[in-house]
Image (cartoon, rainbow, N blue to C red):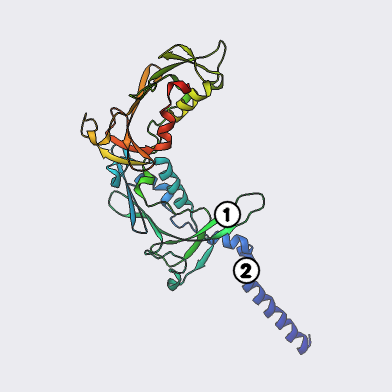
Amino acid sequence: MSRRNRILLALLLLLGGLALALEQPWRGDAFARTRARVQRLFPGLEDQRQDIARVEIESAGQRTTLVRGAGGWVVAEKLQYPADVGRLASLVDTLAGLDDRDTVSVNPDKQETYSVDPAAGTRVRLLDARGLALADLVGGALRGAAEQAGTEALLEFYVRRADRDEVVLAPEFRPPPADPADWIEPRLLPGLQAQRLRWLQRASPDEHGAWKLAVEAPEGAAGAAERRWRMVAPDSRAAVAHVAEGFAFALANLRAQDVAARLGPAAEPGPEFGFPTDVLKAGVDEGTIEVRLGKPAGEGRRYAWVPGSAYVVIIGEFAAERLRVPADQL
């Protein structure tokens, strides 16, 4: 082989080796390598769910503390009222699924730009019984709504592990509310379904305000849409079915907006709440449920209490008016 050919061969071998070193085909393609490098922000959280004993959420001067007690999760700032465990489970699911796939910055000076500094963002901490952080996140600004063909806009927020500088874009994250009222269990009568109610009753000092209805299912009927209602007091006649069903639905789905007071053992609300302006009862299976309405609790709101409950709550006035149906509308 001539000297010239040996030099060309050496150059080809050198270039081939350089290409192998750069491409590293044994490591897979670029997508596979990127996927292999993607890490969960909180890799152990999925297996630590049962260890979560406390959740702290802070934003814009507001703070919510959820605490796991012997009877379940409660909202500390709302007199230990039961917490919305469905919303809490959704938050934990989101945090457990976050990863660093879309890292947009590693510069600590850029945290304010993305609103992921503690002063501007939403801080979320999941703690165990010893006070150790299982997850500590700062949720930041909304990047914008990315349009998706045929679907609703995709909202993407910036997030950052509180102990790291990396800022990540997380389309699955929504900053949780920091107002404690947003974390109370909303349903006054959890698990109750309107279709199970067999009779309805309203007691009120208002003229024509007191009445009682009973359901009459036609022979062979099975669904709630086929139910007929009959007024049994103050007179006996057929009732307006859709109004009765609307009352049943409103009662079964009555929602608390806030907590007004916590009562002592076997205590009833004091006169300051104005109970009762209305007493609402319904028959379910072999039992009876009861809700009492009090006076207005500010504009657009009213006090409510379920006898036997340790709490006086606040409901929306619109929901209350759906339950204050006069007899002549039935």
The one nearer the camera, 35 or 190, is 190
Q: Which residue is mark 2?
A: 24
Residue pictured at 69% horizontal, 79% vertical: 15
Q: Position of residue 300 (x, y in %)?
A: 39, 41
**Is residue 214 visible to the viewer in this orientation of the structure?**
yes
Q: Residue furthest front?
A: 207
- Residue 199, compared with residue 52, is above or below; it is above
- Total marks shown come to 2
**Which of the two labelled residues, at mark 2 and mark 1, occupies the earlier sequence position?**
2
Q: Is the residue marked by circle 2 packed among few (<14), some (14-19), or many (20+) residues within 10 Å?
A: few
Give the Cα separation between the discs numbered 2 and 1. 36 Å
- Give the label on residue 9, or none: none
Q: Position of residue 185 (x, y in %)?
A: 37, 39
- Residue 178, compared with residue 202, is above or below; it is below
Q: Is the residue marked by circle 1 packed among few (<14), some (14-19), or many (20+) residues within 10 Å?
A: few
Residue pictured at 43% horizontal, 55% vertical: 42
Q: Which residue is mark 1?
A: 154
Horizontal side of residue 73 vs 194, given as left or right:
left
Q: Position of residue 218 (x, y in %)?
A: 55, 12
Q: Quadrant of residue 283?
A: top left
Q: Amino acid at mark 1?
A: Leu
**Is residue 270 visible to the viewer in this orientation of the structure?**
no
Residue pictured at 48% horizontal, 56% vertical: 40
Q: Amino acid at mark 2?
A: Gln
